[in-house]
Amino acid sequence: MADSCRVSVVVATYNRADVLRENLQSVLNQDFDAYEAVYVDDGSTDDTPLALEEFRAIHPERLRVLRVENGGQGLARNAGVNEARGELLLFTDDDVTVPPDWISRMLTAYEAHGCDALCGGFEPLSMDTRVERYLHYRMQIGFGKKPRLIAVAPMMNFLVPRALFDETGGFIAEPIEDWVLCRELRSRGRTIFYDPSVAVTHRYQTRWDDAVRRVRSPAILGMNDRLDHGRSGLAYMAYTTAKFLGSPIWSLKHYPPDLYPLSLRMEWLFWRTRMAAYLASYSEKRMQV
């Protein structure tokens, strides 16, 4: 490893020993030299510590390992950032594998686009199940296939200068931590650019209850976060309703025919969940008057 450490790859992991070794192998096999990998074990109860120690023994100068009490990805990532030495932070997830030129290509794209933060692309590891296919197409709706400025980015492939990250105060403890980080960056006039040409491989969930959770969670958290910051819940609900009413049309464009009925059911679930969150907050306010 070079004496200077320009990039710190930060990964939070929790009970993913079954897939973590593939992730470690890819992250630690880069054609770029001036980087470190900081892994934070978020209180795992499986063989995650063993997997991390195996790779630390092989890469003692490259891999740094921390263990914290279980508190969620946001707080675990913060712990990793606190120990990071690089001027640039590169986040990914423990269920992701990255190509050997990942770091060098992300840096090239970052410099070429002149943005403040860069979100790379993501490809599915498998499309064998309907759940994996649905989740991947749903992600594609939000990001598309062309480079562009975006408002929100997942942390599976995200590059940001350490100084700008520190400006935001870091991640919050809630599951919406990536959303809030991006909002804080944008509130400070920072740009987030999406370049799908630099892609990592993501392992999507295969169980229906995981898919339902991934639809319901942002519906609730998005509404609650908006209300917590004094913004109009009614306007947000109106936007959500308009999008839901248009889903029979726009879903035809974004989903293959065999997933079309499922996509409509999921949009109904999203709308219903967000409405319930809005009504719950409205009722709570009425009780406080």
Image (spheres, grey):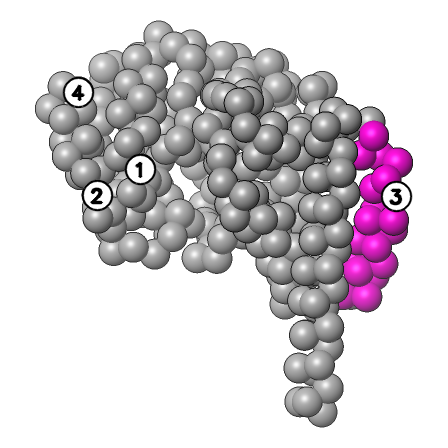
- The answer to whether any part of residue 148 appears in the image is no
Residue closest to the eye, 127 or 91:
127
| Residue at image point 85% right, 58% down | 238
- Mark 1 lies on residue: 16
Magenta-tinted stretch? 233-252
Q: Which amino acid does label 3 sit on?
A: Gly
- Mark 3 lies on residue: 246
Residue closest to the eye, 100 or 112:
100
Task: Tell which residue pokes out farthest to the left in this image.
Answer: 57
Q: In the image, which disc is placed on residue 57?
A: none
C-alpha distance separating marks 4 and 3 = 52 Å
Quadrant into which the C terminus falls = bottom right
Q: What residue type is labelled 2?
A: Asp
Q: Do the residues labelled 1 and 2 touch (CB within 8 Å)?
A: yes
Q: Does the magenta stretch include residue 248?
A: yes
| Residue at image point 29% right, 55% down | 70
Q: Is mark 4 on a helix, strand or loop?
A: loop
Q: Is mark 1 on a helix, strand or loop?
A: loop
Q: Is residue 164 magenta?
A: no
Q: What residue type is labelled 4?
A: His
